[in-house]
Every structure is written in structure tokens, then in C-alpha cells.
Amino acid sequence: MKTRNLVLTGVMAALLAVCAWISIPTAIPFTLQTMGVFLAVGILGGRLGTMAVGVYLLLGAAGLPVFSHFTGGIGALTGATGGYLLGFLLIALAMWAAEALLGKGPLVYLSSAVVGLAACYLFGSVWYLYLYSAGGGAADMLTVLGWCVFPFILPDLVKLALAFALSRRLAPALSRQRA
């Protein structure tokens, strides 16, 4: 891997951490983590963007406080909401696969991001339901979706739109720098 790509991947992983630390206080607070994932792939492309998400998750697994509320460690990844964190990798992989198969057009970016987000929601919700039920809690999938997904759909779509606009402005500038 070229030094430049290594640095860009590290910088994007750090940006993901910063996005995780920014919490928007609403009735159900949310962070900008998904926006960071969308930006990583939009700016760096599928391969490097996915690597940045992987590095971010590895840094968190190693105990660095890169997740929301300055948390980190294996416990954050294996806890009830850890499936959503691991689902970020599904978003990036879906976007990378679509880019490899269909190119880098706006429709490909947006549709693959939505598919990846749905995969993240599904994986995270199944994970949450399993751990919640294993801990003695009584819930069904619809209840978990009501707690963990439905409140976040609109904010995540807004973050996707912002990431799309930003990446369309920043990615060309970054490619000019590469030349």
C-alpha cells in the first residue's frame, strides 16, 4: 500500500472517531458515525473506505475510546449495540461491491449506501434481539426495530445526503492531489 493511501485511510478512521464523538441531543440522541462511514467510501473509494472502517473498528476493539460517548474495547463490540458497530463494515462492503460491479455513479453510491444501511440495521437488530433475549429480556423484532432502528432512519438518510454532497465535492479534489 502506498504511503499516501495508508495516511488517507488512517485520517478517515480518525474522522470516523470524531464523528462518533459528536452527539446530536434530541429525544433519542444520535451520532454522526454513519455519516463518517458514507464519507469514507465516498471520498476514498470502496477499497480504502472499507479499510478505514475496519481500522476504526480495530482501534475500538483494542480499547481506544473511538466509539460514541468515548467508549472502546471488546465489550463495546460484543455488547447489545455492538452489532450496529460491526454493521458499519457491512455498509462499506456493500458500497465497495456496488462500486466494483457498477461503477462510481451517484445512483450507485446512494442505492448501495441504502442497501448497506439496511444490512447494518438488520444485523445490528438481530444481534441486539439475541443478546437482549439471552439476558432475560422479553422483546420481539418489531420492538427492537422500534427502539433501535425506526428513530434513526430519517437522521441516517439526512447524514447520507450530507455525506453524498461532501464526498462529491472532496473526492475530486483529492484525486487531483494524487496526480
Image (cartoon, helix red, strand yellow):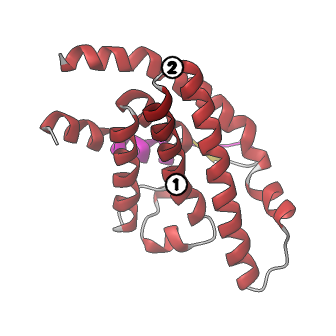
Whether residue 39 is visible, yes or no, is: no
Q: Which mark is residue 46?
A: none
Q: Please tell me which of labels 2 and 1 falls first in the chain.
A: 1
Q: Amino acid at mark 2?
A: Gly
Check the image and report above or below for 85 versus 79.
above
Q: Amino acid at mark 1?
A: Ser
Q: Position of residue 21 (x, y in %)?
A: 48, 47
Q: Position of residue 62 (x, y in %)?
A: 33, 68
* Residue tagged 2: 105
Query: Relative to 26, is 85 on the left or the right?
Result: left
Q: Residue at x 77, y 86 (%)?
A: 136
Q: Nearer the viewer, residue 56 or 67?
A: 56
Q: Nearer the viewer, residue 104 or 137?
A: 104
Q: Residue at x 59, y 57 (%)?
A: 84
Magenta-drawn stretch contains 21:
yes
Q: Quadrant of the C terminus?
A: top left
The magenta segment is 13-27
